[in-house]
Amino acid sequence: MVKSKAPLILVIDPAVKTPELETFNRLAQSSPISLTYHLPALFGLNSLHKLNDEEIKGIIVLGSLSSVNEQLPWQLELGILLKKYFDQKTPVLGLCFGHQLIAHLFGGKVDYVFADQKKHLGFREVSLKENRLWGSPCKGELYVSHQEHVVTVPKDFKITAESDSVPIEGLAHTSHPIWTFQPHPEKEPKSGDRARYLFGHQLVDRFLHFCAGK
């Protein structure tokens, strides 16, 4: 008898300096199914290529200090891999760099927010439109840390989140289970008031449960 494969959600961390281990640990504690962790910029994509497609029920692409406009070899290889899962309609959640990378792969343009390349850092209120992932329209504070943003909506996507600072805070594909956010709803605070991060954590946890069919 063939043993069935255990369902997995892939957490792809494109960190070029410091891996987001605290974020991964929170996701692992919240997820109803197992997660695997991958660092393509630091260690390549071998760990991703070894996985069986039948096991993969979802993918999360985290943030990075890297820019999609650099077109680095690991970015190009990751893009090819993600396109395969897009075609298979695997649920995907892109966050910050992940948001920009997915938009770029579908033909969107990514550029600096400010001409002097100043960084958005801190919290801002983001308004979410009705969507099948989180339901009714809502708004809340999300942590942000980015110099670039998506400036054109790629084909077959619609804007699902916006703010006074950034018009394209979130995107969703019109037919595939792909969602993206410019902010960091996954952000895990090092210390202090965790309540301020709850709105973002709830959004990411909805994706984890969506992948698990719950």
Image (tube, rainbow, N blue to C red):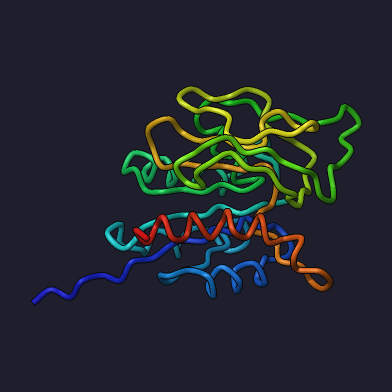
Q: Quadrant of residue 14?
A: bottom right
Please give left or right for residue 124 compared with residue 37 in the image: right
Above or below: residue 132 compared with residue 36:
above
Q: Quadrant of the C terminus?
A: bottom left
Name the foreground residue: 89 vs 126.
126
Residue found farthest to the left? 1
Q: Quadrant of the N terminus?
A: bottom left
Residue at screen point 56% across, 47% down: 94
Residue 87 placed where, x, y %? 34, 39
Residue 77 placed where, x, y %? 49, 46
Residue at screen point 81% across, 69% down: 193
Residue at screen point 51% across, 47% down: 134
Please give left or right for residue 127 compared with residue 122 in the image: left
Residue at screen point 37% across, 32% down: 175
Name the foreground residue: 202 vs 186.
202
Above or below: residue 2 compared with residue 162:
below
Above or below: residue 170 compared with residue 16:
above
